[in-house]
Image (spheres, rainbow, N blue to C red):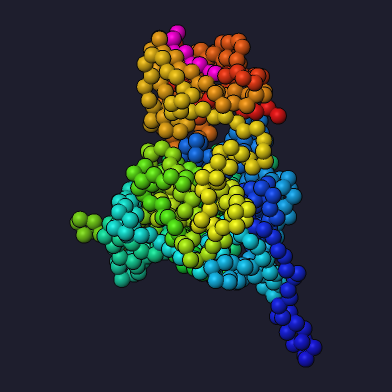
Amino acid sequence: MQKVWAGLWLLLIPFSLPAQSVDVCVYGGTSAGVMAAVSAKRLGKTVLLIEPGKHLGGLSAGGLGATDIGNKFAVTGLARHFYRRIGSHYGRLEQWTFEPHVAENLFGTYLREAKLAPLMGYRLRTVQKEGTRIKALIVESSANQTVIKTISAKQFIDCSYEGDLMAKAGVSYSVGREANSQYAETWNGVQLLDKHQFPDGVDPYNVPGKPESGLIWGVSTEKLASNGTGDTKIQAYNYRMCLTDDPANRIPILRPARYDSSKYELLLRQIQQKTPRELTWNLMHFVPMPNRKTDINNCGGLSTDMIGANWTYPDADYAERERIVQAHEDYTKGFFYFIGHDPHVPKHLRDEMLKWGYPKDEYTDNNHFSHQLYIREARRMVGEYVMTQANCEGKAIVSDGIGMAAYTMDSHNCQRLVVTDASGKAGVRNEGDVQVGRFPPYPISYRALVPKTGQAINLLVPVCLSATHIAYGSIRMEPVFMVLGQTAGAAAAQAIDQNVPVQRLDVTRLQQTLRQNPLLDGSRPELLIDNDDSVRVNQEGKWDLLAKGSQYGKTALLSADDKAAVTFKATTIKPGRYQLFVYNPTRRGGGGNPDEVAFQGDKSARVTVRVFDGNTNKSLTINQQKQNNDWISLGTYLFAKGKTPSVTFVASGSAEPVLADAVLFLPVN
């Protein structure tokens, strides 16, 4: 017995691995973390990327294959390069919908190309500081907490979804929703609206009409506060589920462990009030992915969002977070099983659900279920500058922009509670869902990535950045995280070179680096000319501005004038061989995921486009009714030094209006 106790005691003694010192330490192997690490390495720094889990890429490799963008103009640098490489995999210029394993493999490729070996399976234990400078991180094995390692660095970047490094470093942060009054906003705080809502008549009690029977599962005892009130509640998490209907690749959705059908009673009551004809846009939202797969998101009153189950997650310890994650996994597996098998669910919905299963070729080390819970929002830094609703709407514009966002101010529901209507009848309502958009891309302040002066002089926070709840709802998209991750990596390298605190960085120099060397490898940059470029774009005849479609940037040009033409002049292009593309927006819609390429007959099927290579003109005809929200190729051209090539759209000879938007000159290496 004494030997057994001695053995157990030895297992509890911390075992320290050799310490490691680098220029830049990145914590969190999310999409932002990979881009931050690659960026710092491409700028000549030694880098270590630490990931607590077993996988790289965060949610981009965890099921969110239907990329939320808002406007592709906002996606620049390595982020744009990522979607181009995804496109190459599928035989296109760029692609924004993709399978999880394709994304994860690509993130690994970026690290291998940069000769970076990530430290996988280690999580943050403590942060060592001297005054306002972080000196080192103590990390522990996620599987065996007695194995620890010390990582010292000159600069640190927190790319975790939770902001753990930021918090342990003593940096100010917030959790939940600010009151509207705090930052003069209108869409923050409590918002009882109509999206993803229950129909009227859904009773909240275990025994309908009897409050004494208690509340049905999933309904909170919280009381509805007045509109705009601040609180510590956070928007719901879920899994972005990759399923397949391919029989050769499909694993049936079986009854999961810890299955509890009572968790879906509200779904039955919802269906009783309003029975849907099909699953998508009713009980969940299916987005088709390549190879007969899906990205499934929340949709409706009760869906894949586990509303209210995540309130303690941001500041919880690791054990409590694991319990919350497991609860979400159990809920999600049970949700799909319930719809497919519970006899109370209408047969046509059961039959549709049974067509789907887990894909054999995804998440092969995790029983084919996603490894990444969608942490839509956790901690948010309160830094040198706080991004607010005014920034999203263009009412406050920063001069130190180092990336852009463009998505709708978007919050999923934060709570599910009992609300009494005007007649005094109690019903179930979701609260917190906000979807307010229709604004163009806007700049994100560099100061929103750095802590307040006096807190941490060598830390950058590109994911849990400084923003209010509602502004963060617009910024928190994976492509933007990649852009900000690249910014943070470049800023960390520059701070080392300048030997200055991140708060005193020369932001103008950083902006020049990101603009002139977008891939941070010295390669010949592409040239993208948008129609809003008043210097390079010359109009003839009558052109109207299109601002409510899926245009690239703020607007596109629209004309049915026989005398109209518009020329895009590549005045600063470097000589060499280039592929030319023109962007083909829709006249309506936009936002969300942009890969819809359905036929649209409200544009011209025969548009004349003239390409001038500096010596001769070439005339082509393109069909704008097809390849919507996509690039249309004009071919490959060689541009000589001292020449100014151009692309001209001609509106004459077309029965339908002609659109002129962005023109892309893509280097051919």
**Where is residue 545, by image quadrant?**
top left
Point out the residue furthest to the left here. Answer: 423
Q: Position of residue 355 (x, y in %)?
A: 58, 43
The quadrant of the picture occupied by the N terminus is bottom right
Up-down relation of residue 515 to residue 563 (above or below): below
Q: Main secondary structure of the magenta part?
A: strand
Point out the residue furthest to the right here. Answer: 3
- x 30%, y 54%: residue: 184
- x 65%, y 62%: residue: 153
Q: Position of residue 662 (x, y in %)?
A: 50, 27
Up-down relation of residue 395 to residue 542 (above or below): below
Specify whether residue 472 is painted magenta.
no
Q: Position of residue 470 (x, y in %)?
A: 39, 52
Up-down relation of residue 274 to residue 380 (above or below): above
- x 60%, y 31%: residue: 526
Total numbered circles: 0
From this viewpoint, is residue 56 visible? yes
Instruction: State which region is magenta.
Output: 646-653
Q: Position of residue 318 (x, y in %)?
A: 57, 69
Q: Describe residue 239's horizontal placement relative to residue 186 as left or right.
A: right
In this view of the protein, which residue sits in the foreground, 20 or 522? 522
Specify whether residue 647 is painted magenta.
yes
- x 26%, y 60%: residue: 226
From this viewpoint, is residue 237 visible? no
The quadrant of the picture occupied by the C terminus is top right
Point out the residue furthest to the bottom here. Answer: 2
Q: Describe residue 193's horizontal placement relative to residue 529 as left or right.
A: left
**Where is residue 191, by image quadrant?**
bottom left
